[in-house]
């Protein structure tokens, strides 16, 4: 079994853990390769371009936080991903840094379970071609630097839903409901629920609320504005600047992301802990 390792090279804790992991793997003669950027930061020769890791390796290890895991998931395709959280919030990364070796041992023994997570697929016209992008968390169309408030036109299965005047539109999976959508006022959705949520960003109508829809729907979004260019983001990465009238089509991807599950981790415990649910407020604090 060969491991592909992706590291958040901007976090000292992730770099330190990667060095410890190298020693642990070498001691056991286990095969591994780092993505090129991580290998360069660590000064090691076992490297490959991140686009090639899926062909070379059996399992991915993500060392960082949720952002690193999202980045890794784009290249893991359907290969299992062990998410190690060295950050603070961490909804997606299943394991703490103290659990990394136990998690790898479970995978080596074949004694592990998988959380399969739905992805979004965004289709956008680029020239005469249709480009496809995937997102585990969300697809976001924003007004960006546009100085006025545009209208975002949304259709569901070809029928118009509404025209939202807002700073943007978030289309999130159940996995991504605790990300940008949550901060914009969207609901928390239990993982693996067969739904998407459409959340307007700072809508200029008090009656506009997030909308939960079945994940078998096809969503079309375009911008009604006289000019401007509007960033299309997939999991926080700008994929294209959309012109007025251009349509991005969003639907459920045929490919699932497979996250190695932590049997000692309870999603509801995480929500209570990370979001401070049920904490008593003490006067003066």
Image (cartoon, rainbow, N blue to C red):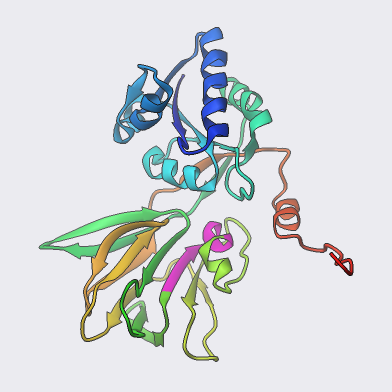
Query: Residue 33 is drawn in which quadrant?
Result: top left
Query: Residue 261 is drawn in which quadrant?
Result: top right
Expressed as whole percent of the image width and height from the top left, the position of residue 55 reads: 32, 29
Q: Which residue appears at 85% of the width and 67% of the height? A: 281
Query: Residue 51 is drawn in which quadrant?
Result: top left
Q: Which residue appears at 45% of the width and 53% of the height? A: 136
Image quarter in which the C terminus is found = bottom right
Q: Magenta part of the protein: which range?
A: 169-178
Q: Which residue appears at 22% of the width and 57% of the height? A: 131
86 or 4, nearer to the observer: 86
41 or 170, nearer to the observer: 41
Q: How many marks?
A: 0
Q: Left of 109 or right of it: where is 236?
A: left
Q: Report if residue 175 lies within the magenta region.
A: yes
The reply to whether residue 28 is in sight is no
Q: Is residue 24 above or below residue 13?
A: above
């Amino acid at each position: 079994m060969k491991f592909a390792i992706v590291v958040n090279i901007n976090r000292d804790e992730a770099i330190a853990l990667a060095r410890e992991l190298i020693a642990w793997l070498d001691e056991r003669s286990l095969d591994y390769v780092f993505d090129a950027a991580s290998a360069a930061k660590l000064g090691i020769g076992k490297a490959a371009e991140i686009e090639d890791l899926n062909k070379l390796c059996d399992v991915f290890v993500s060392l960082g936080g949720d952002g690193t895991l999202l980045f890794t998931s784009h290249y893991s395709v359907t290969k299992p991903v062990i998410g190690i959280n060295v950050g603070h919030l961490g909804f997606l990364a299943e394991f703490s840094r103290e659990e990394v070796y136990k998690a790898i041992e479970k995978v080596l023994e074949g004694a592990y379970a998988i959380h399969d997570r739905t992805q979004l697929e965004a289709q956008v016209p680029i020239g005469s071609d249709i480009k496809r992008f995937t997102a585990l968390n969300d697809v976001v169309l924003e007004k960006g630097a546009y100085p006025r408030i545009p209208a975002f036109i949304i259709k569901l299965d070809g029928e118009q839903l509404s025209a939202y005047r807002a700073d943007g539109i978030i289309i999130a999976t159940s996995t991504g409901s605790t990300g940008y959508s949550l901060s914009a006022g969207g609901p928390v959705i239990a993982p693996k629920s067969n739904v998407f949520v459409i959340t307007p960003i700072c809508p200029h109508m008090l009656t506009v609320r997030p909308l939960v829809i079945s994940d078998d729907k096809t969503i079309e979004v375009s911008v009604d504005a006289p000019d401007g260019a509007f960033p299309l983001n997939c999991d926080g990465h700008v994929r294209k600047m959309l012109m007025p009238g251009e349509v991005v089509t969003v639907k459920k991807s045929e490919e699932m992301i497979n996250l190695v599950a932590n049997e000692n981790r309870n999603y509801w415990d995480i929500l209570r802990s990370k979001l401070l649910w049920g904490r008593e407020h003490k006067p003066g604090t």
